[in-house]
Image (cartoon, rainbow, N blue to C red):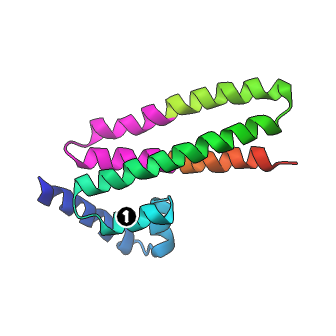
Amino acid sequence: MVAGLFRRVAMRVACLVAIGAGPLAAQEAQPGSAAYNSCMAKAQTTVDMVSCMNDEMALQDKALNMVYQQALAALPVDQRQKLRAAQRVWLDFRQKDCDVFYGKETGTIASIDAGGCMIRHTVSRIGDLRLIAERP
């Protein structure tokens, strides 16, 4: 089972190398904090990787909530309800979109793929909300 996981990860890395993906592409494929990227680089097992992802999701969820509150505060009162509704829909979308990985893959790789999906979506949403919060 572990050998199969490493084979699949190796194939994904080989595909990135084959299409000429350098460090920038790898970073884009795995957004997150420097601590997360360092943790994942050191991870030896699926359990290690899941632990890195759980720590990163806690960090990113905290950032998401902070930037969401800033975005709400930056909007006129009549636009706040629209953002609240959009955020509820986005949270549902993120969960459902990432849950797809549990049906696509079996075994421990599904939790890695789904966790990566959650992090990618969350980092992207933080960027979107930051645009709203920082718009004059």
- Position in image of residue 101 (x %, y %): 33, 41
- Position in image of residue 106 (x %, y %): 21, 42
Classified by dominant secondary structure, the portion drawn in magenta counts as helix
- Position in image of residue 85 (x %, y %): 66, 24
Q: The disc labelled 1 sits on which kind of residue?
A: Cys
- Residue 4, picture quadrant: bottom left
- Position in image of residue 114 (x %, y %): 36, 44
| Mark 1 neighbour class, 10 Å CA radius: few under 14, some 14 to 19, many 20 or more | some
Disc 1 on helix, strand or loop? helix
The verdict on residue 27 being magenta is no
Q: Is residue 33 above or below residue 63?
A: below
Q: Residue at x 70, y 37 (%)?
A: 69
Question: Magenta segment range?
Answer: 94-120
Q: Residue at x 31, y 68 (%)?
A: 42
| Residue 104 horizontal side relative to residue 88, left or right | left
Q: Residue at x 22, y 59 (%)?
A: 45
Q: Name the residue nearer the viewer: 104 or 78.
A: 78
- Residue 21, picture quadrant: bottom left
Provide the residue designation for mark 1. 39
Q: Is residue 57 above or below residue 102?
A: below
